[in-house]
Amino acid sequence: MRDLLELVVESGLKKGASFCEVRYFEERGSSVSVENGVAKILSSGILRGIGVRVIANKCWGFASTNVVTRESAERALIDAIGCARAITSHAGEEAKIVEVDPSVDFIKHDVKINPEDVGPEEKVKKALELERAAREFSDRVKDAFVVYRDVLTRVIVCNSFGTFVEEITPRTHISCRVIAREGDNMQEGYERVGCVAGYELIEGISVENFSLRAAKRAVSLLSAKPPPRGTYTVVVDPRVGGLFIHEAIGHNSEGDHVFSGGSIISDKLGQKIASDLVTIIDDPTIVGYGHFIYDHEGVRARPHIIIRDGVLVGFLHSLESAAKLGSKPEGSARAQSHHYPPIVRMSNTYLAPGDMTLEEILEDINAGIYLSGSQYGYVESEKGQFTCKVEEAWLIERGELTEHLRDVAISGLTLEALKNISAVGKDLRIEMPGMCGKAGQSMFVDAGAPHFRIDGIVVGGRR
């Protein structure tokens, strides 16, 4: 494989490319989907191929192929160069990259139990066991779903800087969704676990801490009350906090958004944009679902501090965004497969812990709302607005959690919310494994936070 990739890079330079990158991608995986006691989906597959990216005529060109042969790879190279030469570059829009020192390395993440050594029967059996516990918890549980997935990704990056790095990464993920119903009232409970790990992750799961927990939450929400509407002090748990950090500031810190004008913080580097209590980090080196050692441009990953003590100190970068913004790439470019060029992506993004307990955060709140569990979120980066839908909540009255609430969503202005963070706990948890979508690509990420408090958040409610 190395000879083939280096041959294509050499050929690209001879054909006039000023930069050439060839990336081999291979992904092997299996999945199981169980619904209401029936295994609905059992699948496995392999995706492999080569993506070629060049700079020629001061423009980017990219092409890919599923056929891993010299002839097909060189055809992709010719197509990529042809694409670049067919584009007219405009002043200020020329393709440019930071030239980095080459890396030569091989990384294989070890696992205790290789998922490929576990038969499909065992995977189905485990999924059915977890699903059954949720379904049988109560006659008010109407639907239960468990989805299991394992994937082994092999990425080789070879470029004209002299970089040749290979990384083999296993990821395992399982989720449980439970729907409870009483009359017209329908509520959901959700749990998920995922990491760079093997099947040992699944063997370590108990029904009590996974599917049964989701079922209990769904059923208990049937008797919860709709939230009051208005502006409140809110306290968020690590999952809601992780969702907020990912959506509200993570996407705004991506270098390609910054140089294209799509970020509200593009002109605020070095400025204070958050409370003194806020330090936000994106760290691919943490062993979470977003973990990796080298990005898909062959750059070794390092922790990226985005905000330190309230001050914006950095962005996430690719080779290109670093060049355009006069910065240094530290491993934030990834691609879904060989069919896509690498773009700037988050990895494991979190709010750094403070020194308070949850009780201390709550104690001086006379009237507020405690938010727990995330369902979804989205951000309008250019407007600086965010919305987060949470699983459940409680009223906070005189420092105590009282009435259970359902169907709660919060929204606000990102920079205003960051400045209004008034207390940060010490109980950091990064437990939001999932896929983040951007520019038509999905990528493995994780997020988290300790408990923290935000003053003046708009809560949507029906009373």
Image (tube, rainbow, N blue to C red):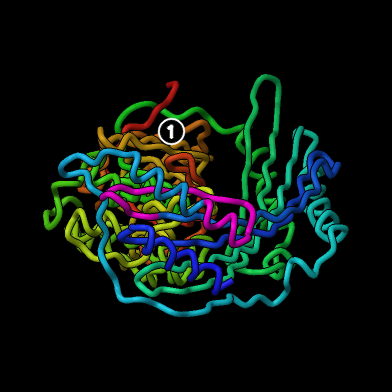
Q: In which quarter of the image is the N terminus?
A: bottom right
Identify the residue under disc 1.
409
For this view, does 328 lie left or right of residue 29?
Answer: left
The reply, left or right, for residue 402 in relation to residue 257 is right
Secondary structure beneath dot 1 equals strand
Over which residues does the magenta segment extend? 54-75
On the image, the x and y values in percent for residue 126 come to 81, 58
Horizontal and vertical percent position of residue 125: 85, 56
Magenta stretch: includes residue 61: yes
Q: In which quarter of the image is residue 222?
A: top right
Q: Which of 386 and 397 is in front in this view?
A: 386
Q: Mark 1 is on which residue type?
A: Ala
Q: Residue at x 39, y 51 (%)?
A: 343
At a point 62% along the width and 77% down the height, the residue shown is: 110
| Residue at 40%, 45% in the rendered image | 82
User: Residue 104's spot in the image, x, y percent?
Assistant: 44, 79
